[in-house]
Image (cartoon, rainbow, N blue to C red):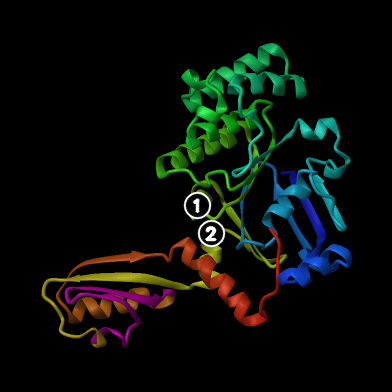
Amino acid sequence: MNAAIEVENLTKTYRVPIRRPGLKGAIKHLFARQYRNVVALDRISFTVQQGAAVGYLGPNGAGKTTTLKVLSGLLHPDEGHIRVLGFDPWRHEEAFKKRIGFVMGQKGQLWWDLPAHDSFELLREMYEIPSRRFLSTLQELVERFSVKDLLYVPVRNLSLGERMKMELIAILLHEPQVLFLDEPTIGLDVMAQHEIRLLLKDYQKRHGATLLLASHYMRDVEDLCDRILLIHQGNILFDGSIDEIKKHYVPFKKVSFTLSRPVESEEVFSQWGEVQEYSGSQVTLTVAEHKVTQIMQLIVTRFPVVGVSVQDPSLEEVIRVAFSTFDNGQGGRDGVA
């Protein structure tokens, strides 16, 4: 399988003005500006194969949006080698633009005062989509997104969820092979988030598209992605599957026991693991993964257990531990988006 995205030693630094507080500081900033350099990306490298879906995760200021903007050609890197579908993004070749799509959850490309259909017609001209193909693709997307009755409603009158669906149609009209997704479900309610994830997953499966997703919603990542890249302070911390990251940072499982009669003290369970929850007849322990079976057998033989469940730590918990581990080991520094 060929690589859709190749990144080697990508570096990007911003020159940020230093603003002093107070009137004196404002006047000084006006006539004698001072700057500091902020490293957004620090020689990062990774490869994404065609048809893969990769979650690109990190806290605010980690470098996620900067990476996506560089890969899409919106920003020029300071150093590094990048290829997206065999193209150099910053050359802005027409053939490259027609093969990628960029979704930014907080920004849109639709004309605010016009119906979405008018914007779609404009995009048809921009991407030089043949009329027959345009009509077929638009009809398919409109039916799939259930927005037929909203095509001629001004965008400003649409709800956030409806507007986001229209934005996705606009991105998918030219059938891009690579999708850069920056918080595609931000601000949406639970049902709208679920619908957007289904639509993206369906598109990827049917078109063999490559997805690079930056999101703070772990459900987006779990539903769409088969691989995770962790970025923090401009550095790649981890590259692997969801199962691998859980085993790497949180090699524990949560084991819950339901008892037929209450046990007086939670202390009797602390010898087998960290007690997370205790309510007399309900106990939840955090147990080292390799000891789960052994400890379950011990507790079942000693207490009146009527129910047992074993859960993996949530992805959100794992990510939090990963970033905490990095900060405690290396300290922090300022970052950018």
Residue 242 - label: 2
Left or right placement of residue 286 versus residue 267 in this view: right
Q: Secondary structure at mark 1?
A: helix
Can residue 292 be found in the magenta stretch? no
Left or right relative to 299: residue 178:
right
Magenta region: 268-289
**Residue 187 in picture, x, y percent from top left:** 50, 46
Distance between mark 2 and mark 1 Cα atoms:
8 Å
Location of residue 285 in the rendering, given as x and y in whole percent from the top left corner: 32, 76
Which residue is disc 1 drawn over? 222
Secondary structure beneath label 2: helix
Q: Residues within 10 Å of mark 2 (few under 14, many from 20)?
A: some
Q: Nearer the viewer, residue 299 or 122?
A: 122
List the single residue furthest toward the front.
23
Q: Quadrant of residue 61?
A: bottom right
Above or below — where is 333 with respect to 111?
below
Amino acid type, mark 1: Glu
Q: Residue at x 31, y 85 (%)?
A: 270
Q: Position of residue 317 (x, y in %)?
A: 47, 67
